[in-house]
Amino acid sequence: MLTGHQTWKFPIPPVILSTATVVGPDEGEGPLVNDFDIVHGDLMLGQDSWEKAERVLLEESTKLAVENAGLTNGDIQCFVAGDLMNQIISATFAARTLSVPYLGVFGACSTSMESLAIASLLVSSGAANHALAATSSHNCTVEKQFRYPTEYGSQKPPTAQYTVTGSGAAVLGREGRGPRVTSATIGRVVDMGITDPFNMGAAMAPAAVDTIEAHLRDLNIEPGYYDMIVTGDLATVGYSIANELFEKHRIPMHQTNYYDCGLLVYDVNTQDVQAGGSGCACSAVVTYGHLLKKIKSGEMDRLLVVATGALLSPLSFQQGENIPCIAHAVAIESGRRG
Amino acid sequence: MLTGHQTWKFPIPPVILSTATVVGPDEGEGPLVNDFDIVHGDLMLGQDSWEKAERVLLEESTKLAVENAGLTNGDIQCFVAGDLMNQIISATFAARTLSVPYLGVFGACSTSMESLAIASLLVSSGAANHALAATSSHNCTVEKQFRYPTEYGSQKPPTAQYTVTGSGAAVLGREGRGPRVTSATIGRVVDMGITDPFNMGAAMAPAAVDTIEAHLRDLNIEPGYYDMIVTGDLATVGYSIANELFEKHRIPMHQTNYYDCGLLVYDVNTQDVQAGGSGCACSAVVTYGHLLKKIKSGEMDRLLVVATGALLSPLSFQQGENIPCIAHAVAIESGRRG
């Protein structure tokens, strides 16, 4: 299983039996609207708090993913999930609703691929026949918790990112038809001394590059092995820094198509989203909604998703700490090639 | 690997190559003082904030555990850790210091066994040759975050629990001498409608019983299989409720020695700790410090640790939510018997 120092190459690659994505109004106005299963027209989802609305996003995506796989909750041996809220309450309350064994995880916005990697390990190792990986984020819960009261409407610098309102879930199984998770690279914490929470793309880019470098080295492959490599939520500033770092580290990314989920989920030229999308749901809804459809349709065969996370807390920021970052990579392949 | 619905029975049981425990002054005045590796005389540890002090606890325990195993950080393929702080910053900053691949997890006080279970799965499945599991808590960081500013010195009801200041870490390997992790049962979220954060033992007891019941059913064993079963941090109120529930559910716990780490770590009769200990570090330091010594010395052979977690956040409590709870169980055996 362990290949190189930080990569798991799954001897029995788990099958992604189904996925489901739920998003809010801004994502519904973005270019990927047709790739999402449920698009909500308002941010409250009929709830009396944003936190409850976020929980509903996660409850909807997990319910739908289990249904789409033709399964019931009783077939799921483990729910692996996390989110950005203090004590990951969205995931916990969704786990209460699902009533299945639950592993809570936290990797900030890298949670999407951390949960998918762990769920894949569970299934590949035989610790679960079916595992459910999911994450969520909500623009207003995150603004309120990490920045200023949302009602202030405080101005933001153009380097800031816009948290995706949404949730993505995937059901993994040992057998069946569908794209397979072939490997996962677990990231290290990278801290380049950045302390500005309004410029998280710059903080996260080096972590993404560190993990991509480790992934390629561990598996002894080049970027061209993949039809596409996407980072999680670097947005314009981080994407440009990542490209500079690839050049500096002589990683031949020109061999592949390199995108960032934070730039795919919104139209940064016409939508008021500053540098682009972020949040746990950003890479989750883009991967589970948009990119997996491209694999299923035959448009591509090999995808590497490198979800990035800024591991700050409001308190660590207030106490003057740097923003430590991490990135976890998961490879998803159609199996049509090799 | 999967046995029954929620238990992993490790075909290659990972070896606990080493552990390390670090505690604060109150734990140093408790009955287990001689079982801990480092006992700090003050709560600040020479730092300028309690959060930094907590981080030092975790940095010390992980450093010592790696050294005690005769390894270096480069030998560790994965650090699995979490804590009670918002966005688990103690674990993140310790991961930055260690500079090894890192999976952040959150299960409130069940994090001790959640991290040990996942680290065991990594080693048993071959995803890591060596994995490091750890957690921490600090009385003052928790009081400040979950209850009232610590300086208030607000009075507490006798059902309240006293958060352990400490950290416990364990290094797991595929080969070597030492106790082995033989199985792990992943808990479900159990919510009995309790909303009082000053009575978490009562909220957590049903989760502990649910997981113990699942563990025994999945492995088709009786409590007498174990020389000892310990819950994580139910303290006096929760311990008594758990005993009532065992009786009600006809679980013959009289066959074994049933204790609670929250009642072992302090002398509740002489120390001013209300109902007893709690916090991620409670079950971690009692297990890694006290109980493993009993296994190594031959005093016992089979131990089941059932770490309990109250998955509330300050916000979920303020919004009137119940306290959802969870418990994860890990079996540790000497291998001397069967």
Image: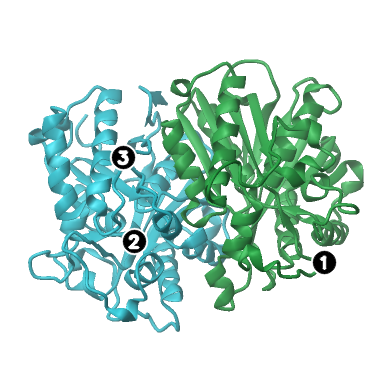
Chain colours: A green, B cyan
Q: Chain of mark 1?
A: A
Indicate the amino acid at tag 1: Pro
Indicate the amino acid at tag 3: Ala
Quote the CA–CA distance across marks 3 and 2: 20 Å
Q: Are marks 3 and 2 on the same chain?
A: yes
Q: Chain of mark 2?
A: B
Q: Which residue is mark 2?
A: B20
Q: Which residue is mark 1?
A: A158
Instruction: State the SS at label 1.
Output: loop
Closest to the observer, A294 or B113: A294
Q: Residue at x 42, y 31 (%)?
A: A100
Indicate the amino acid at tag 2: Ala
Determine which quarter of the picture holds residue A93.
Answer: top left
Above or below, comparing residue B56 to residue A33 in the picture:
below
Q: Residue at x 53, y 62 (%)?
A: B92
Closest to the observer, B107 or B175: B107
Query: Residue B91: in sight, yes or no?
Result: no
The image quadrant where one finds the C terminus of chain B is top left
